[in-house]
Amino acid sequence: MKLDLENIKKLAKNIKEHNLSEITVEINGTKLTMKKEDFKQEFSNNVKYLEKEQLCTTSEEIIEVPNQLEKVIEGENIVSPMVGTYYSAPSPDSEDFVKIGDKIEVGDTVCIVEAMKMMNEVKSTISGTIVAMKSENGKVIKKGETLFVVK
């Protein structure tokens, strides 16, 4: 086999027919490498041309955006000791362990965090009054996430 145009065309055809990504041939000290490159062309048949006036429009409508900033509540935080699902009560039929305004002591159970099908009671490490509850029942929480603010 010699490296001429006919043989190069045959090699290219073999790449296509056999779905090869690369082929290398060395003949009489001459090395030829052919690589198949994925050539993707994107076309859009649904091109819509707009007049210059349609590109920019103005509107007199004013939309009020609610202020989503949280109020900063002073106090000490009770944080989640682990990643899991937050539950405010021992069962769906039971009352919550604590509510805003409840007085708690060190060691009181304030919620449950379910992790890997294990129910883990979260106990208070501080005494005081619950002034804010920062999580919702059934919500996934992260380790270190604030659950309650106590004053």
Image (cartoon, rainbow, N blue to C red):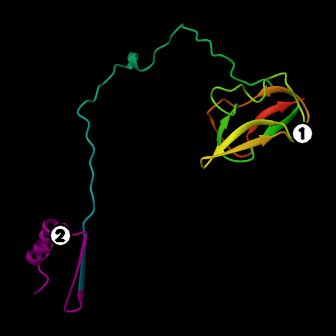
Q: Which residue is mark 1?
A: 106
Label 2 and label 1: CA atoms lie apart by: 75 Å
Residue 145: x percent and y percent?
73, 40
Residue placed farthest to the bottom in the image? 28
Which residue bears the numbered disc 2? Answer: 15
Where are the magenta residues, as a range? 1-30
Is 21 one of the magenta-colored residues?
Answer: yes
Of the numbered discs 2 and 1, the one sitting upstream in the chain is 2
Queried whether the magenta region covers residue 66, the answer comes back as no
Secondary structure under the numbered disc 1 in the rendered image: loop
Please identify the quarter of the rendering in which residue 54 is found.
top left
> Image quadrant for the C terminus?
top right
Mark 2 near mark 1, Cβ–Cβ under 8 Å? no
Image quarter where the N terminus lies is bottom left
* Towards the viewer: 43 or 119: 119
Q: Identify the amino acid type marked 2.
A: Ile
Image coordinates for residue 104, horizontal then vertical, percent: 87, 31
Give the class, few, some or many, for how many residues have Cα within 10 Å of label 1's Cα (few <14, many ≥20): few
**In the visual, does 24 lie left or right of 78?**
left
Secondary structure type for disc 2? helix
Instruction: Measuring from the top left, give residue 117's x and y in whole percent.
Output: 60, 47
